[in-house]
Amino acid sequence: MDFSAPSREHRRVVILGSTGSIGTQALEVIAEAPDRFSVAAVAAGGGNLDLLAQQAVSTRAAAVGAAGGTEADLERAIATAADDAGVRGYAPALLAGPDAVSRLAAWPDADVVLNGITGSIGLAPTLAALAAGHLLALANKESLIVGGELVRKAAAPGQLVPVDSEHSAIAQALRSGRADEVDRLVLTASGGPFRGMARNELVGVTPAQALAHPTWAMGKVITTNSATMVNKALEVIEAHLLFDIPLDRIDVVVHPQSVVHSMVQFVDGSTIAQASPPDMRLPIALGIGWPFRVPGSATPCDWSTASSWTFEPLDENAFPAIRLAKAAALRGGTAMAVYNAANEEAVEAFHSGIIGFNDIVDTVAAVVEELAGSPAGLQPGTPTLHDVLDAEQRARASARLRCGLQEHPRNTNAE
């Protein structure tokens, strides 16, 4: 694809993480716009082969991949789904195993890859999609954050398109001016389920409370990250890497209604905001169709009814994750890989009832500080993929030890 001359022609989309929240919504978007999109391939972690098979059959995807299980398992699931749907003669290419998702990210018969995987396990597929020359609609923020310059150097101009609602909003608002006219980026945060609570009030909150997000329906890790503000911290770093704006010119403001998704402040004092009811189908559609909009992707704001939007400053004492992430990012090297890996382990420990809510970010801070001087921890310069994976492994081991987890280090799956 020629990224300098984007086309409105029909696009074949590979969906990574198809059984997760982003993936299932992407399939809805594609089904509603058959003149614009079709599914080239679907891939997931393998935890829900039945759903993956149903998606493959319903879209007639040319290829199907599962990081878990075997090709025989996948073949049986697809045969069952095809029988249930009354479909005959459907025989897609099957890929199974640890590298299946990355192989599908580079699938040759595709135009766009949507990376909707959760966690840093999405880094290898991100790099594979970029190397294959596909337009990459990135919902897997962790791969950019932990990969940093490694990912940025792999991407051609215009090849990397954000799908997070905040970064999609910024990308849209940036069309209002030149790069040298941008003063600041302002990311909005809903505040999560614990908005307005002081740090001492967060001591006894439960996993169930942390998962009760007031606005968005997301998976366990992202929802918990939203409660701790780690998700917003990662989005700050993502904005820095995507738009090349210094960290000290990226702000966060709490906006409970989640209608204004982010803003760009220009040097003349003008602020451009993107607003829409909270619905991920809009940034997903724009991501896979970029730079063109897809009519009817989501319901617009209803200006015929009264409504109020409020904005509040972030309480960094109660929620220090953003300050910690900025400090880690300024260290460079593999610092953000350490930050993210330690957080994933701490979130797991919290949901296992081993540590408290405040201990999640405290653990991240301790692991980042511990590995600050490690040759395989926070290395200067641009790390290699091996550097990132090694730093992650060390961070996971340290976090698990601090949290009292005894099993082998884990990683999030590809859904």
Image (tube, rainbow, N blue to C red):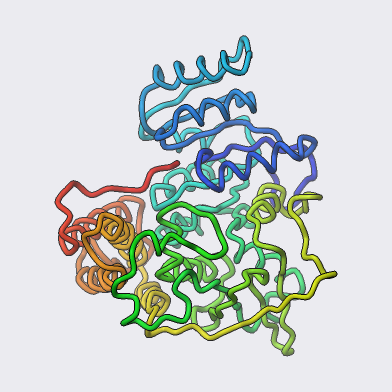
Residue 360 rendering spot, x and y as whole percentages: 30, 67
Q: Nearer the viewer, residue 272 or 85?
A: 85
Residue 310 rendering spot, x and y as whole percentages: 64, 81
Residue at 72 percent across and 89 percent down: it is 269
Q: Where 180 falls versus 71 (above or below)?
A: below
Please indicate, yes or no, whether residue 250 appears anywhere in the rendered image.
Answer: no
Residue 283 rendering spot, x and y as whole percentages: 66, 56
Residue 62 found in image quarter: top right
Tell me if 284 is positioned left or right of 231 in this view.
Answer: right
Q: Where 73 falls versus 161 (above or below)?
A: above
Total numbered labels placed on residues in the image: 0
Residue at 59 percent across and 69 percent down: it is 243
Q: Where 257 falls versus 135 (above or below)?
A: below
Q: Quadrant of the C terminus?
A: top left
Q: Nearer the viewer, residue 207 or 75?
A: 207
Q: Residue furthest top?
A: 89
Tell me if 376 is positioned left or right of 237 in this view.
Answer: left
Tell me if 406 is positioned left or right of 8 in this view.
Answer: left
Residue at 75 percent across and 49 percent down: it is 6
Residue 405 rendering spot, x and y as whole percentages: 17, 55
Residue at 78 percent across and 45 percent down: it is 7
Please indicate, yes or no, whether residue 363 appears anywhere in the rendered image.
Answer: yes
